């Protein structure tokens, strides 16, 4: 998508990344899948779906961490 670590990140891009989150419908689906997972009731398809959400969430968390670093005032 873009080279966060190589060329850096602009402040507007960092602010946009921090504003990203799962839409409400996806957040609800994640909660439902987590509940089923805790109960041991996920199908194989649901397991793959939840894993995809987790992977996307991890990537988003990484990008947001980098964005916070860009926006942090110099010490």
Image (cartoon, rainbow, N blue to C red):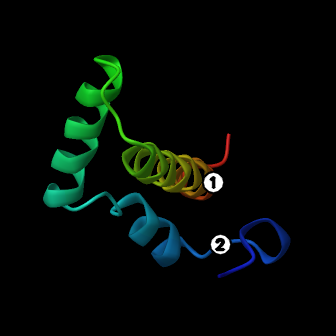
* Few, some or many residues within 10 Å of mark 1 (<14, 14–19, 20+): some
Left or right: 35 with respect to 57? left
Image quarter in which the N terminus is found: bottom right
The residue lying toward the viewer, choosing from 52 and 12, is 52
Residue at image position (55%, 46%) is 58
Name above or below for residue 75 compared with residue 14: above
Q: Does 51 appear above or below 22?
A: above
Q: CA distance from mark 2 to mark 1?
A: 8 Å
Which label is found at residue 9?
A: 2
Residue at 41% in and 45% down: 50
Q: Residues within 10 Å of mark 2 (few under 14, many from 20)?
A: some
Question: Foreground residue, 1 or 39?
Answer: 39
Q: How many marks?
A: 2
User: Where is residue 41 drawn, in percent x and y?
Assistant: 30, 27
Expressed as whole percent of the image width and height from the top left, the position of residue 75 reads 68, 39
Q: Earlier in the sequence, mark 2 or mark 1?
A: 2
Task: Say what secondary structure mark 1 lies in.
Answer: helix
Residue pointed to by mark 1 = 66
């Amino acid at each position: 998508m873009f080279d966060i670590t190589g060329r850096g990140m602009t402040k507007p891009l960092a602010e946009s990344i921090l504003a990203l989150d799962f839409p409400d419908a996806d957040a609800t689906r994640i909660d439902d899948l987590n509940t089923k997972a805790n109960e041991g009731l996920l199908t194989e398809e649901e397991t793959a779906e939840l894993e995809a959400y987790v992977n996307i969430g991890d990537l988003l968390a990484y990008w947001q961490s980098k964005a916070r670093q860009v926006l942090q005032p110099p010490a």
